[in-house]
Amino acid sequence: MVNLVWLGMIVMGILVSGVKGNIEVVTKVALDSANDAVKISISLIAIMTFWLGIIKLAEEAGLIRALAWLVRPVMRFLFPSVPKDHPAMGAIVMNLSANILGLGNAATPMGLIAMRELQKLNNGREDTASDAMCTFLALNTSCVTLIPTTIIGIRLIYGSVDPTDIVGPTIMATAVSMAAAIIVDRLLRFFYTDRRR
Amino acid sequence: MLEIISELSRWAIPVVLLVVPLIAALRKVKVYETFVDGAEAGFATAIKTIPYLVAMLVAIGIFRASGAMEVLVKTLSPALNIIGLPTEVLPHAIMRPLSGGAALGIASDIIKTYGPDSFLGRLVSTMQGSCDTTFYVLTLYFGSVGIRKYRYSVILGLVSDLTTLVASVLIVRTIF
């Protein structure tokens, strides 16, 4: 699927550029985007280094396990393949909390730490996503910030009477899509099991 | 309520930075040494994401810049009309999982054109707030641990984005 989407975007993009007569854009955009990608990764070095240090402290102090223990009932249901009180559970909770609070700078490192922990449980198939990873990413991408500050700002600029009146609908829509993600994840997991192991 | 949440956001990280080292120290962890020990992996993790991000962002960049989106919008519009979804927000719905910045630009345009308190303005605001940049997140997260085979994650992400679109339309229509 990811191969199809990737190829589709490139083929469609180049064909449409050709037909529209602005094919020279393709080369420039390709290089610019590659450059942006490297910049993102480079800027990740700083926050990853910082948060990995803090997380190591939290781990040694037993705080990650304590957090994992606190949320055990929900997490056992969502991630049956992860052993109880595993550090991955703590990292997942921290990532989702940071997401909800809109702390982008902390959410990404926590998410990558969660992935690292989940990868440790991914026996034998290091290049393939595990069930728990798929569930985690579905939750991560469907659960977003409680206060969408950027869009509230834009509504304010264009003279909204009540810029924050979309917060309620946003949370509701998020809840619906999270529920859908959890249900569809279970169904897909069932259909995809035989390809693995 | 909103004030409480934004105060919580402001305090969350400083509190974590205070509490974690303190409790670690109380538990006889050598705080400085342990921090450095953990932080060492930061460089490798970040650098590992480069090939994945380059691959994905180049494809998205070409797609965005070419104007292929208009073609896709024209193709999909009839289907959208049949199920009663407003076609004006289709560019946003397509762009949202691919590029956060591009989607925000489209959302601002719609808010500017139709007004923030119009149905479309509120709809696109809700969509912007309740969706995430699915492809970017998948690429970054999987890339950091070297996973190439995403299995059903992509379909799952798209299903969840589509649900958000439909839910947003229904919710905004009902509430306002």
Image: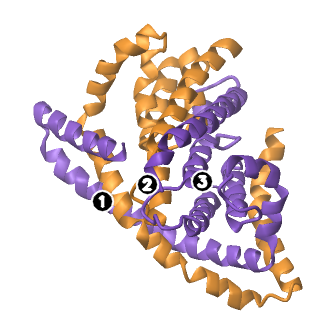
Chain colours: A purple, B orange
Label 3 and label 2: CA atoms lie apart by: 16 Å
Label 3 and label 1: CA atoms lie apart by: 30 Å
Label 1 and label 2: CA atoms lie apart by: 14 Å
- For residue A79, side relative to residue B146 (left or right): right
Which class describes the residues within 10 Å of circle 2: few (<14), some (14-19), or many (20+)? Answer: many
In front of the other: label 3 or label 1?
A: 3
Residue on which the image places disc 1: A34
- The residue shown at (63%, 38%) is A182
Which subunit holds the residue at mark 2?
B
Residue on which the image places disc 2: B139
Is residue B98 visible in the rendered image? The answer is yes
- The residue shown at (44%, 46%) is B135
Closer to the chain start, of discs 3 and 1, is: 1
Place of residue A175 in the rendered image (x, y in percent of width and height, measured from the top left): 69, 33
Which residue is outermost to the right? Answer: B26
Return the mark for residue B13. Answer: none
Q: Secondary structure at mark 3?
A: helix
Where B34 sits versus A124, above or below?
below
Is residue B129 visible in the rendered image? The answer is no
- The residue shown at (69%, 78%) is A56
Where A21 sits versus B5, above or below?
above
Question: Amino acid type of disc 1?
Answer: Ala
Residue on which the image places disc 3: A132
Place of residue A22 in the rendered image (x, y in percent of width and height, measured from the top left): 14, 39
Question: Amino acid type of disc 3?
Answer: Ala
Place of residue A26 in the rendered image (x, y in percent of width and height, measured from the top left): 19, 47
Question: Amino acid type of disc 2?
Answer: Thr
In the depicted view, which residue is nearer to us: A181 or A52? A181
Where A168 sits versus B157, above or below?
above
Where B157 sits versus A115, above or below?
above
